[in-house]
Image: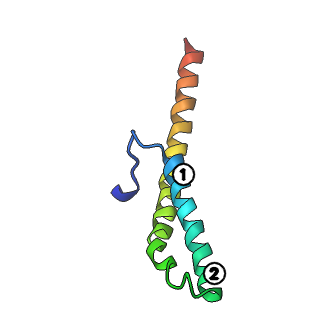
Amino acid sequence: MAIFTRSPTINYNFVAGVYAFFTALCALLSVLHFYSLQVEGFYIVLVPFVPCFLWSLMVRHRWLQQSKITGENADESKKQK
């Protein structure tokens, strides 16, 4: 699928980390939503980060697999020389 193809100039470790931070913040605000009136509904703003975080994990996984395969091929070509 084209939506899961990686871009060669993007560091997906950083992207997944940023999305993870805001997903955790969304979870914290959604828990606080039930205990405090001051933060009622704030979690709604951060809800879009949850599917983005899952997407970035899938793309990151493919990115790491391709890097691993590329690295193994480079090691094999060095051994043959």
Residue 41: percent from the left, percent from the top?
Answer: 50, 84
The disc placed on residue 31 is 2
Residue in front for this viewpoint, 45 or 2: 45
Question: In the depicted view, which residue is nearer to us: 80 or 58?
Answer: 58
**Percent of width and height locating residue 62:** 50, 49
At 51% from the left and 64% from the top, the residue drawn is 54
Q: In this rendering, is residue 23 above or below 74?
A: below
Q: Secondary structure at mark 2?
A: helix
Vertical comparison of 50 with 41: above or below: above
Asked if residue 9 is positioned above or below residue 60 in the image, the reply reads above
Which of labels 2 and 1 is toward the front? Answer: 2
Residue at 51% of width from left, 62% of height from top?
53
Report the residue at 51% width, 59% height from top.
Answer: 19
Q: Quadrant of the N terminus?
A: bottom left
Q: Residues within 10 Å of mark 1 (few under 14, many from 20)?
A: some
Question: What residue type is disc 1 on?
Answer: His
Above or below, 10 relative to 51: above
Indicate which disc residue 61 carries: 1
**Upstream in the sequence, badge 2 or badge 1?**
2
Where is residue 9, by image quadrant?
A: top left
Left or right of residue 36, residue 48 in this image: left
Q: Position of residue 78 (x, y in %)?
A: 56, 17
Q: How many marks?
A: 2
Q: Nearer the viewer, residue 24 or 33?
A: 33
Residue drawn 34% across the image and 56% down it? 2
Callout 2, which amino acid? Answer: Val
Q: Circle 1 sits in a helix, a strand or a loop, which is it? A: helix
Q: Quadrant of the C terminus?
A: top right
Foreground: 41 or 6?
41
Residues packed near mark 2 inside 10 Å, few (<14), some (14 to 19) or many (20 plus) = some
